[in-house]
Amino acid sequence: MKIGFYDDFRPCVITDRGVVDVSQVLRPYNPGHAQLLLENWISNFALLRPQLEAAAESGAAIPLDKARLRPPVPRPGKLLMGQGNYMEMVQGGKPKPLSLFFKSPDSIIGPNDTVVLPPFQARIFHHEAELAFVIGKTATRVHAAQAMDHVFGYFAGVDVSARAPWLGGPGITPNTGEGPWMPGNFGKSFDTFCPIGPYIVTADEVPDPHNLHVQYWVNGQIRHDYNTSDMEHRIPELIETMSAITSLKPGDMFMCGTNHQGLGPLQNGDVGRIGISGIGGFSNPVVDDLKREWHHSVDAMAAGTVRESREPAKA
């Protein structure tokens, strides 16, 4: 089943006929906030499923192009990100430890919402197309063998990233490029820097999340083009590792990281589009009041640097 929100965050199921409103089905579970509604919806999904399926079959449908789909996870309690989590298509490459970080939930936007590049003096703004998933039941110190039972569903996401002016340089402030502020992964948490969507595809409809084709285009030009089979630390390990530190709750969200081959810039006037096989896709326009410009192509230097870090040591 495909579930999500549309227009003024009304809950819906997405069918071949279009968007079907399920507000009446979920009325007893709606506390008045979309994220809390989602958490109740997920927690009670087995009980609600027959009613949702009946609504999907016979409810009035709005054509998909007439409804405004909203972010399917509006504001998760935890937004966790995989870092450097792909082998970059290097056979026999050097393994790296799992690295996770938090991104601000306030960075989330939905399909067709605008990515706004801030005045932060970045050396470049990158797109990172990723598979995302949402937790379906509380996970505390879960073993990897049971971890997939805690995944409710999957969707697509883009980790927009403001790169610091120079790697390893002194800290900088977001607006002036001077001062002691240390960006690190804060450069990923600006407002609008986490487009997600177009809806959640429940886990039963995704036979193997580690064999999905991820693509990303900018103005119709292909950038990212990889398979999730290249993921180094897979979903069970992500859940096992994080649930040993903090309990994961229904509605918490992970993004699995990206393969950096195909990494490229986003700039004013661009339209980026992500698509994942079996999951779906969406577009976002990009606006930059400063009208900064970079070469419209894959960032070969950045992709090459990441790939080289994976190359086996030469004899």
Image (spheres, rainbow, N blue to C red):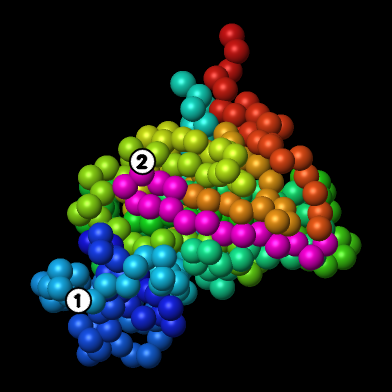
Q: Position of residue 241 (x, y in %)?
A: 39, 53
| Circle 1: element type | loop
The answer to if 282 sits in the magenta stretch is yes
Of 220 and 94, which appears nearest the observer?
220
- The boundaries of the magenta stretch are 275-290
Of 288 and 243, which appears nearest the observer?
288
The secondary structure making up most of the magenta span is strand
Is residue 138 visible in the rendered structure shown here? no
Distance between mark 2 and mark 1 Cα atoms: 31 Å
Name the quadrant of the C terminus. top right
**Pointer 1: what residue?**
59
**Three-letter amino acid code of the residue under disc 1:** Gly
**Pointer 2: what residue?**
212
Q: At 46% across and 35% down in the image, what residue appears?
A: 226
Q: Which of disc 1 and disc 2 is earlier in sequence?
A: 1
**Relative height, residue 280 to residue 57 (above, below):** above
Is residue 69 visible in the rendered structure shown here? yes
Q: At 52% across and 56% down in the image, what residue appears?
A: 283
Q: At 44% across and 42% down in the image, what residue appears?
A: 214
The answer to if 5 sits in the magenta stretch is no
Of 225 and 246, which appears nearest the observer?
225
Name the quadrant of the N terminus. bottom left
Q: Position of residue 213 (x, y in %)?
A: 40, 39
Crowding at dot 2, Cα within 10 Å, few <14 / some 14-19 / many 20+, comes out as: some
**Three-letter amino acid code of the residue under disc 2:** Leu
Q: At 40% across and 86% down in the image, what residue appears?
A: 33
**Relative height, residue 83 to residue 180 (above, below):** above
Q: Position of residue 97 (x, y in %)?
A: 50, 40
